Amino acid sequence: MNLYHLEYIAEIAKTGNISRAAEHLHISQPTLSIYLNKLERSLGLRLFERRKNELIPTEAGLKYVDACRRILGIRDELYRDLFAEREAVVRLGILRTSISIFNEAFQALKQEFPATVFLPQIFSSEQIYSELTEGRIDLGFVTSYHPDFHAVFPKASYTVVKSYELMLMISRENPVFPLLRFKDGCLDEESYCLLQGLPIFQGKNAMVQRQMKEFVFPALGIHPKYRGGLIDIEFMFQAMMMENSFSILPESRIQGGNIAQIPFSFHPKIHRLFIHPAGKRLTRPEQALINRVREAYEEISYYYDVSLL
């Protein structure tokens, strides 16, 4: 057992649901279910009662969860003690898709701020905002489909890093594709209704799904059939070609396949931004990190790099 496994049990107890816990932990639901079942078999004890879609800790489970939380608390206290003599510790919440850019930024900032420690944790955008408002991180890097950032993150200030235009992604072999009409290089508004009968693939991020339903779909005047949420972007594109479905995704670099990227006439965008507690003054290391990450994203003209060869 390692500390990650303790976090698994603590998160299951917190959410009461395997799927939500897996999403917050950024692992697959089957992986988490298998781990829990294996742990219970090895202990010879039931840690959670299964009731429909809810997991409720048993008496033994409550003791186990409490121990997990205490051990994780000791870990956090140890980190605070270890870095107490440093000039600063910057606690970050970042997206899994941005790991490589942040690692490069951390390396570049070592010489400029040798006494500063950057402690990143990987979360979804929704969880990053929750961690920020509860004071467990100092700075978050999130994604928003909604143009009103204050509506999505009301208790945070923000710095926009990069915006990408959202595009209709659809196979040229889809029976609907020849029926689409265009105006000034964009999908004509009269063609929006043709998407109504098609299933749509979207990512699994709960905040993104909600913002699509609240902002993008109403602007299109459609209520598409939700086909499913996928993390593997290449598989999503393959499924779109095989199942005559579509998706709405940021502008991407697509190699191979037969996928058309079509802009909408109202030009919706997806935004990547830093958030921090409202009224908080950024430290020099935090501002330097924001500048470094923004420079890195300015050199990237696409959101996804998809190979369908």
Image (tube, grey):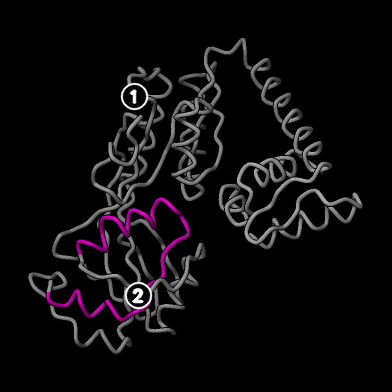
Q: Which residues are magenta?
A: 190-219
Q: Is residue 137 above or below residue 235?
A: above
Question: Looking at this view, is 8 or 281 the one in front?
Answer: 8
Residue 308 x, y percent position in the rendering: 45, 75
Give the amino acid type for the residue marked by disc 1 in the picture: Ala
Q: Is residue 248 magenta?
A: no
Sequence-first tag of 1 and 2: 2
Residue annotated with mark 2: 246
* Quadrant of the image occupied by residue 154: top left
Q: Is residue 90 above or below residue 292?
A: above
Residue 46 x, y percent position in the rendering: 83, 52
Give the amino acid type for the residue marked by disc 2 in the picture: Phe
In the image, farthest residue toward the left: 184
Question: Looking at this view, is 106 or 65 the one in front?
Answer: 65
Regarding mark 2 in the picture, which secondary structure is present there? strand
Left or right: where does residue 17 sit relative to residue 5? left
Mark 1 Cα-neighbour bin, 10 Å: few <14, some 14–19, many ≥20:
few
Regarding mark 1 in the picture, which secondary structure is present there? loop
Mark 2 Cα-neighbour bin, 10 Å: few <14, some 14–19, many ≥20:
many
Residue in view at x 41 percent, y 29 percent: 289
Question: Looking at this view, is 222 or 161 the one in front?
Answer: 222
Q: CA distance from mark 1 to mark 2?
A: 38 Å
Magenta portion: prevailing SS class = helix
Q: Is residue 304 above or below residue 14?
A: below
Q: Which numbered circle lies on residue 73?
A: none
Q: Which numbered circle lies on residue 278?
A: 1
